[in-house]
Amino acid sequence: MKHTISALVENKSGVLARIAGLFSARGFNIDSLAVGETQDAAISRMTIVVRGDDAVLEQVCKQLNKLVDVIKVQDFAGKDFVDRELILLKVSTDGKTRHEVLQIVEIFRAKIIDIKAKSMTIEATGSDSKVDAIIDMLKPFGIKELARTGKIAIARG
Amino acid sequence: MKGAEILIESFRKEKVDVVFGYPGGSVLDIFDIIYKSGLRFILTRHEQGAAHAADGYARATGKTGVCIATSGPGATNLVTGIATAYMDSVPMVAITGQVPTRMIGNDAFQEADITGITRPITKHNYLVKDIDELPRILKEAFYIANTGRPGPVLVDIPKDIQNASTDNKYPDSVEMRGYKPNYEGHIQQIKKAAEMIMAAQRPVIYAGGGVIISNGSEELTKLAGKAGIPVTTTLLGLGSFPSTDDLSLGMLGMHGTKYANLAVQDTDLLIAVGARFDDRVTGKVSEFAPHAKVIHIDIDPTSIRKNVNVDIPVVGDVKKVLAELIKNIKKCDTQPWLKKIAGWKKEYPLSYGKGGLKPQFVIEKIYELTRGDAIITTEVGQNQMWAAQFYKYTRPRTFLSSGGLGTMGYGLPAAMGAQAGCPGKLVFDIAGDGSIQMNIQELTTCVLNKLPVKIIILNNGCLGMVRQWQELFYGGRYSSTILNSKGPDGEKGITFCEENKCHPYLPDFIKLAGAFGAEGVRISKDSEVIPALKKAIESDKTYIIECIVDPEENVFPMVPAGASLNEMIESMA
Ligand SMILES: Cc1ncc(C[n+]2csc(CCOP(=O)(O)OP(=O)(O)O)c2C)c(N)n1
């Protein structure tokens, strides 16, 4: 099962490696991992998306909690939370297709942030499914480059 | 103060009375301060020896063991010792030198990313990049190492930081958002546990190393006595409950007593105390204690429900939780259960056959002469299991052994550390002929520092425990486990000391003892055991007794790996 785990950690070097190590030591592949400062610059939030056996993941979360630099861990599985991902996507366009691409961008409430004769660069945010959907829609035009931030998440309320 | 001075100051503040280590280019500033400091520093002959010695010191005294090594190869030589301490929750602070900060990451001479290397085998580690942080980091390192579930903490100090100065003082207390060990067990949970204990018909206590770490042996003994509950211990739990007590079942698991394993398989309530359900204990997990409800008391929430399901978890310090539990318990009627167990004990005692000098016999005699008052360290293999089975541990911190990692070469340096921490005590390393060769260089350290450790080499001419597995499960194909002197020239063997009628074996351990400045004697008959032991005990020297034992002897009973505790092999017959 897919888990979205959020960890508040000390904003220090080595912390990321320590956390990633707990997953890699068990042979888990991290689907995505996003880190950034919180309202307190000394604290970072890590959002980790990982697939794995529930019991093993419960153990990993307990292990995360045990790390000296980890302040709080939440597994959002089964909980109410909001999540977003940001992508930057460069798609091939020409005079004929530009309009179609613009329409798609509009429908997904994405943004054009760069435009050239043969390409457009698009910024989109949203949940996995929305981000996946826009990528799917743009694929036929030819995606030249794609960058995803990985998911960030926060509990509702 | 300069960085190196702050380090020595922290030792003083933390009441560290002995430090083990080895110098090198990146720690020259530290060693220069040590030179003038009056600190008791023991120069080992290998950094692995320093780490195990710090570990043995810590296990024997309950204090934090400290070791120092230089950057690169010095630091990597500590790794096995750190991993050993990590697996057995031993409080240790390892200090390593590092190349100057501006060179870190450049593959500089003798650079190794030791914080990266030791991340999975330390409780926490630090690379100090700012001299102003050094006092706080050292304070935290000692605090983390010896609180909660103890463990090794490594502090990597670049050469320029050792030399830089700061006005920051060594703090009196620590403040860490992410680290707040919880010692008090939940009172409601403890009450529920007490009720469950009083309702049980066939309870068993399964005590682990956590009892010793928390100094909870007295409470454990009281609880067992008050409620009339038999106690089995893990390897690392030996000494947490007197094995001379009627309620003692000895050790359980792969080489546990048959009666301990039968009791666990029959119990209706297993009370796990400071133990972690290691696979060497449980055998096949799905068939472990099949009829039992489980109470699990442990300071580490991650040990709970890791391997087995638990009915009542109590997270807290074993000593505190047990004290609370005792208050909530009345005497239970376990007489029929104890009678059944007494029957098993009579029927299936630990025993061994005759023929040649038996290793078990040697260990029994060590107990006879020391009455359980000595500190026993072991290497790894058959020697370790016989030392666990045939010596009676009556006090905590008297059995030091690498349980979790199973590190050959642990015993001698650990004995050395224990002897440094407990000068008045008699310390024995029970060794195999294979293991002793892994850190034999520390004989020098023992001799020069007047650490009169007694080394009992149970020489069976082979890597006995591996040979035992090959005999039982690999059709007797002894691939690379025979160490006796039948070297490449085949059956002829090496007869280097025939004129002295000595055992043709390489190395000649007795000559080796002489070369290292220790004393030694070789024995091969029952009648020689007591006189040799007496002489060693009376001597104030580091002493080797090489016992030429029956090379075919195996450790029994044995639960094959992955089998259930009922499926014991009791002998070769
Ligand atoms: C460092 C290390 N290497 C290898 C092993 C695997 N191993 C476990 S027991 C053993 C044999 C030990 O032989 P010896 O020290 O002679 O003791 P005996 O079993 O004969 O008493 C070996 C090789 C180990 N535990 N540790």
Image (cartoon, coloured by chain):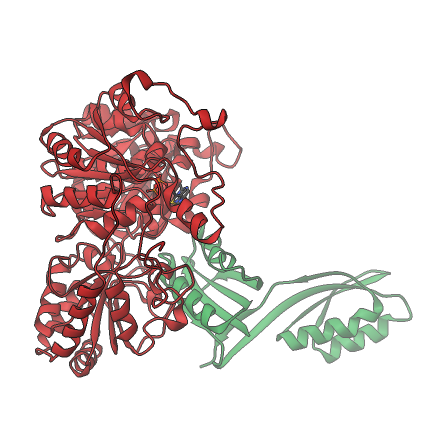
Chain colours: A green, B red
Q: Is residue B556 above or below residue B450?
A: below
Image-quadrant location for residue A133: bottom right
- View quadrant of ligand 1: top left
Task: Determine the residue located farthest toward the top in the rendered image.
Answer: B499
Residue B295 place in picture, x, y as percent: 26, 74
Q: Is residue B320 above or below residue B311?
A: above
Nearer to me, A115 or B525: B525
The N terminus of chain B: image quadrant: top left
Q: Is residue B201 above or below residue B371?
A: below
Residue B85 place in picture, x, y as percent: 31, 47
Image-quadrant location for residue B368: top left
Q: Total of numbered circles in the picture?
A: 0
Residue A83 in view, yes or no:
yes
The C terminus of chain B: image quadrant: bottom left
Residue B312 in view, yes or no:
no
Q: Residue at x 32, y 30 (%)?
A: B440
Nearer to me, B423 or B142: B423
Nearer to me, B358 or B445: B358
Q: Is residue B82 above or below residue B289?
A: above
Residue B553 place in picture, x, y as percent: 32, 45
Nearer to me, B378 or B316: B378
Image-quadrant location for residue B495: top left
Q: Residue at x 38, y 61 (%)?
A: B279
Residue B161 place in picture, x, y as percent: 36, 34
* B105 left or right of B137 in image: right
* B410 left or right of B345 in image: right
